[in-house]
């Protein structure tokens, strides 16, 4: 049902808006330390209902302990019909001990509101890595598997999906 590609512009924005990568942030886990907050922006394209969409998203995550965060994200799918919005609470662990590239794994629940159709719930997992592109900025690249709960194949062509994701996150 869904396939997303991140925009190359995310990488350009990371370099344009982030300070040069220098020393790791204070604390053993750096930008992934307990008490840190990350703000995330996503942009890309998506395919659903034989239509192409512009997908824009914003979210935030909070590190409950070094490497482990809880997050809440919002996506808007526009430019085609039906329009969609997605709300996604999530958990994620970042392997901050690894030098240079920081692998991550996570899980999520998603509620999708689709104009003119019943809401759709899904669960999934993600894996990927963060690359530090500024003092407190990280470019994330990864893959997601999502399975739709109570999915009706008469309405939806597929009841699960695998897609790539790209994100730009700022740690505070």
Image: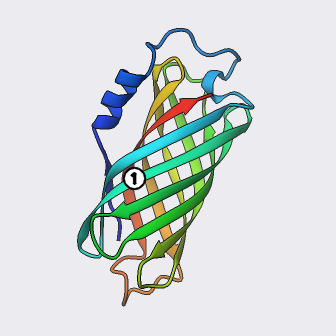
Looking at the rendered image, the quarter that the N terminus falls into is bottom left
Looking at the rendered image, the quarter that the C terminus falls into is top right
122 left or right of 6 in image: right
Closer to the camera in the image, 20 or 4: 20
Q: Locate residue 90, reporting x and y percent.
A: 62, 53
Closer to the camera in the image, 43 or 30: 43
Q: How many marks?
A: 1
Q: Residues within 10 Å of mark 1 (few under 14, many from 20)?
A: some
Closer to the camera in the image, 38 or 140: 38
Q: Compared to 140, does 42 lie above or below?
A: below
Q: Which residue is mark 1?
A: 56
Q: Locate residue 80, reporting x and y percent.
A: 27, 69
Closer to the camera in the image, 117 or 102: 117
Q: Locate residue 168, reporting x and y percent.
A: 44, 36
Q: Compared to 172, does 44 lie above or below?
A: below
Corner quadrant of residue 125:
bottom right
Corner quadrant of residue 37:
top right
């Amino acid at each position: 049902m869904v396939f997303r590609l991140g925009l190359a512009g995310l990488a350009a924005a990371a370099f344009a808006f982030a300070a040069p990568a220098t020393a790791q942030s204070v604390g053993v886990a750096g930008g992934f330390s307990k008490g840190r907050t990350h703000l995330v922006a996503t942009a890309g394209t998506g395919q659903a209902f034989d239509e192409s969409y512009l997908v824009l998203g914003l979210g935030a995550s909070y590190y409950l302990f070094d490497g482990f965060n809880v997050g809440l994200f919002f996506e808007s799918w526009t430019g085609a019909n039906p329009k969609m919005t997605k709300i996604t609470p999530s958990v994620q662990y970042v392997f901050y001990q690894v030098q240079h590239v920081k692998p991550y794994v996570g899980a999520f629940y998603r509620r999708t509101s689709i104009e003119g159709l019943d809401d759709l719930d899904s669960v999934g997992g993600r894996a990927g890595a963060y690359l530090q592109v500024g003092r407190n900025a990280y470019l994330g690249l990864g893959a997601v598997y999502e399975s739709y709960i109570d999915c009706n194949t008469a309405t939806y062509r597929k009841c699960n999906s695998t897609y790539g994701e790209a994100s730009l996150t700022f740690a505070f």
